[in-house]
Amino acid sequence: MKYAICNETFGDWPLDRALAYAQEVGYTGWEVAPFMLTDDIGSFSAIKRDAYRQQVERAGFEITGLHWLLAKTEGLHLTTVDGEVRKRTVDYICDLARLCHDLGGKVMVLGSPQQRNVPEGQSMESAMENAADVIRAAVPILDELDVQIALEPLGHEEGNFLLTAAKARELQGMIDSEQVKLHLDVKAMSDEERPIHQLIRDNADAMIHFHANDPNRQGPGMGNVDFVPIFQALQDIGYAEWVSVEVFDYDPGVERLVTESMENMLRARAACS
């Protein structure tokens, strides 16, 4: 397993300071929220992309890819019946795939609940078909660039679409592409009936990315979730990809969130048989 940290964790810290701190703590992966780079993907030039990638790599990191793909955008939506909006969303996802590739990333985590929630009056069947159509339309560029989308189930607290790993697997099956797999998130899985460690085992064949956090919206081990069974399950399935820390409550402060998350993960990992 490899440990990554999401770049928005560091807020307004200068990039060099954030990378130095994360490197000192022991992270080797850097997961990017696009809105932390630019408000306009189109204006984030090849020169800027190359400079960002080189700075991150010189600090000893690999850019894992992107997440929060549609966050802080306007006029984009995954499940809407509006065909023009869906077309713009396809185009934007393709632009993000190019950004991900240019930064050296391989995986794009598709969460962004506000841009995928099913509008009132629309059926879930229609929403699933529309989401499948959008993602399917982006598959050719994903194939070309060797970038994968990881569908992210999110709990009821976040919205009304893809609330379980099973539902994300259903959408994955509708798209039927090796470039579309599954992402699992501890906070989200805590909302499911099945134990987290069982969900990991059940979906081992499809999972390509993992977020470590807690239902209290802080880092792994900073709430009530026991991470020993989680890391035992990851170990048992032979998971060798990124375990990436994603937090939402920044009140404890950057240093504590970043440091304690790593300490807690390493402690849980060490307790595995």
Image (cartoon, grey):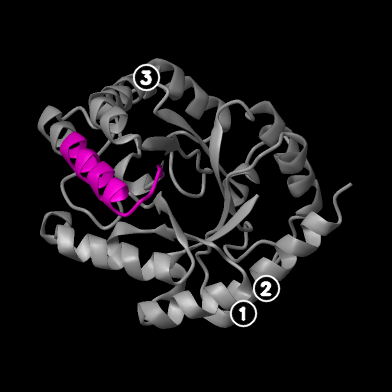
Mark linked to residue 256: 1
Residue 245 as seen in the image, left or right of residue 201: left
> Which residue is tagged 3?
175
Q: Decide which of tag 1 and tag 3 comes sooner along the chain.
A: 3
Residue at 75% over, 42% down: 235
For the point 89% across and 46% down, the residue is 273
- Find the residue positioned furthest to the right: 273
The magenta stretch spans residue 22: no
Q: Are the two marked residues, 1 and 3, in contact with CB atoms closer than 8 angstroms?
A: no
Tell me what residue is drawn at x 61 percent, y 25 percent: 205
The kind of residue on which mark 1 rests is: Arg
**Mark 1 and mark 3: span between their CA atoms?**
40 Å
Q: Is mark 3 on a helix, strand or loop?
A: helix
Which residue is denoted by mark 2 in the rendering? 260
Percent of width and height locating residue 253: 54, 81
Q: Is residue 234 left or right of residue 127?
A: right
x and y percentages locating residue 108 in the rendered image: 38, 44
The numbered mark at residue 183 is none
